[in-house]
Image (spheres, helix red, strand yellow):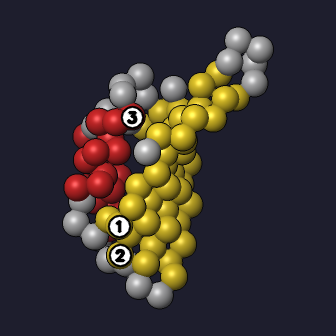
């Protein structure tokens, strides 16, 4: 299953590296990433895939120092081949 994860965090030089290490250690594969720095905050949008529960990843990302907010939308392939989005808080 694929998930779009949106992370809002304080701007720090090592931030991206730490977040990707958490993604990898939790058994997820990052397939797409976009980040934008605005003054003292960084907005990160990453698409991850795994058969594991996304809550395992979201909970760990929220614990990271400097992370302000984490939101997730899950993408599941419906039987009629249309993507279905589901927001996880």
Q: Is residue 84 visible?
A: yes
Residue drawn at point x = 32 percent, y = 41 percent: 57
Q: Residue 17: x and y, percent?
A: 32, 61
Q: Is residue 30 visible?
A: no
Assign a secondary structure to mark 1.
strand
Assign a secondary structure to mark 3.
helix
Which disc, if any, is residue 10? 2
Horizontally, residue 2 falls left or right of residue 28, namely: right
Q: Which residue is mark 3?
A: 54
Q: CA distance from mark 3 to mark 2?
A: 23 Å
Badge 3 or badge 2: first in the primary sequence: 2
Q: Which image quadrant for residue 79? A: top right
Assign a secondary structure to mark 2.
strand
* Residue farthest along the bottom direction in this orientation: 39
Badge 2 or badge 1: first in the primary sequence: 2
Q: Residue 7: x and y, percent?
A: 44, 59
Q: Which image quadrant for residue 36? A: bottom right
Q: Quadrant of the C terminus?
A: top left
Q: CA distance from mark 2 to mark 1?
A: 7 Å
The mark lying in front, picked from 2 and 1, is 1
Residue drawn at point x = 43 percent, y = 28 percent: 50
Q: Which residue is mark 1?
A: 68
* Residue farthest along the top direction in this orientation: 79
* Residue farthest along the front direction in this orientation: 89
Q: Which image quadrant for residue 27? A: top left
Residue drawn at point x = 39 percent, y = 34 percent: 54
Q: Residues within 10 Å of mark 3 (few under 14, many from 20)?
A: many
Q: Residues within 10 Å of mark 2 (few under 14, many from 20)?
A: some
Check contact, mark 1 vs mark 3: CB within 8 A: no
Q: CA distance from mark 1 to mark 3?
A: 18 Å
In this rendered view, identify the residue nearer to me: 24 or 3: 3
């Amino acid at each position: 299953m694929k998930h779009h994860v949106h992370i809002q965090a304080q701007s720090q030089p090592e931030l991206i590296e730490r977040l990707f290490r958490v993604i990898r250690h939790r058994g997820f594969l990052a397939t797409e990433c976009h980040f934008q720095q605005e003054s003292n905050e960084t907005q990160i949008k990453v698409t991850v895939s795994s058969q594991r529960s996304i809550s395992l990843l979201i909970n760990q990302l929220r614990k990271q120092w400097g992370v302000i907010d984490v939101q997730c939308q899950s993408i599941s392939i419906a039987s009629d081949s249309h993507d279905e989005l589901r927001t996880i808080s």
